[in-house]
Image (cartoon, helix red, strand yellow):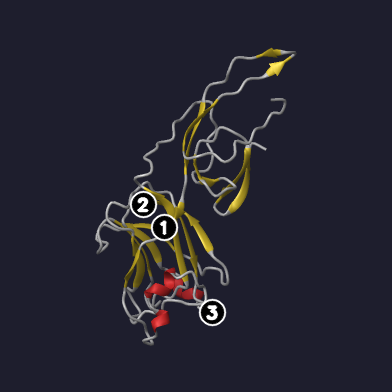
Amino acid sequence: MATNSYDDENLDEGHYVYQVSAVVDQTESELSSAAEVDMILYERLIGKVIGTSGSWSGSSTSTRNAVFDGDITTFFDAPVADGAWAGLDLGKDNEAIVTEIRFYPRQNLPDRMVGGCFQGASKSNFSDAVTFYTISDTPKTDTFTSISVVDAGQYRYLRYIGPENGFCNVAEVEFYGYRSGISALTPPCADNVRQTPEILFDLQGRYVVTPMPKHGLYIHKGKKMLIGG
């Protein structure tokens, strides 16, 4: 090829090896050391809705189901102020590795999410819970907040648990990742491969395990990032 860049688009999930050479005055160099990448397709994780039952007003539209109904105008308003939560049971032998969390606060009450946290667990009572992220500042209103997760654990149960006096108020929570049965890939390292941020997605929304072998435009923590440009 005559250019010094290359976009390898529409890749299927799998392991890829890249090598390059240079041509000067019609003489081609030896191939470079191999740079390797594992492509893992990620998806929005779905499952049975679990968590604190009921609602403050007794309304059927303000229960835990509202957290996962895809409607930002509905929200969970738990019957208790402290310790309420809403989550997903992904099912037996259907554990997943979480790569991203997106959440949308209850309209006009985003402060009720400060101190809330997102967790994964292998046990239904969350006695072995691992906390992915704790909300430390009032989230933005009228928009989703996206959080990258760096955790190789495989979890059947996922949840958002509200802070004290928060009534678990939240409009929407979305967990993204990939089923643990899809792949157990470990990205190889090479001395000549420049390390890049830990969580990247290509422009088709596919999760890319770094290090990266090529220049290009990627998504990192919800923002576009140019590698090597």
Residue 187 against residue 1 in the figure, above or below? below
Q: Residues within 10 Å of mark 3 (few under 14, many from 20)?
A: few
Numbered disc in front, either 3 or 1: 1
The residue tagged with tag 3: helix, strand or loop? loop
Q: Nearer the viewer, residue 122 or 130?
A: 122
Residue hosting label 2: 96
Task: Report if the CB atoms under discs 2 and 1 are less than 8 Å apart.
Answer: yes
Residue hosting label 1: 45
State the image coordinates of residue 94 (x, y, percent, origin top left): 32, 52
Q: What amino acid type should be assigned to the residue bearing mark 3?
A: Asn
State the image coordinates of residue 43 (x, y, percent, origin top left): 46, 53
Q: Residues within 10 Å of mark 1 (few under 14, many from 20)?
A: some
Q: What amino acid type should be assigned to the residue bearing mark 1?
A: Leu
Residue 28 visible in the picture: yes
Task: Quadrant for residue 8, please give it.
Answer: top right
Task: Quadrant for residue 80, please give it.
Answer: bottom left
Image quarter hosting the C terminus? top right
Determine the residue located farthest toward the bottom in the rendered image: 57
Q: Residue at x 58, y 18 (%)?
A: 31
Residue 164 against residue 180 in the figure, above or below? below
Mark 2 vs 1, N-terminal side: 1
Q: Residue at x 24, y 61 (%)?
A: 127
Residue hosting label 3: 108
State the image coordinates of residue 4 (x, y, percent, origin top left): 69, 28
Q: Nearer the viewer, residue 204 or 35?
A: 204
Q: What amino acid type should be assigned to the residue bearing mark 2?
A: Ala
Q: Residue at x 66, y 19 (%)?
A: 22
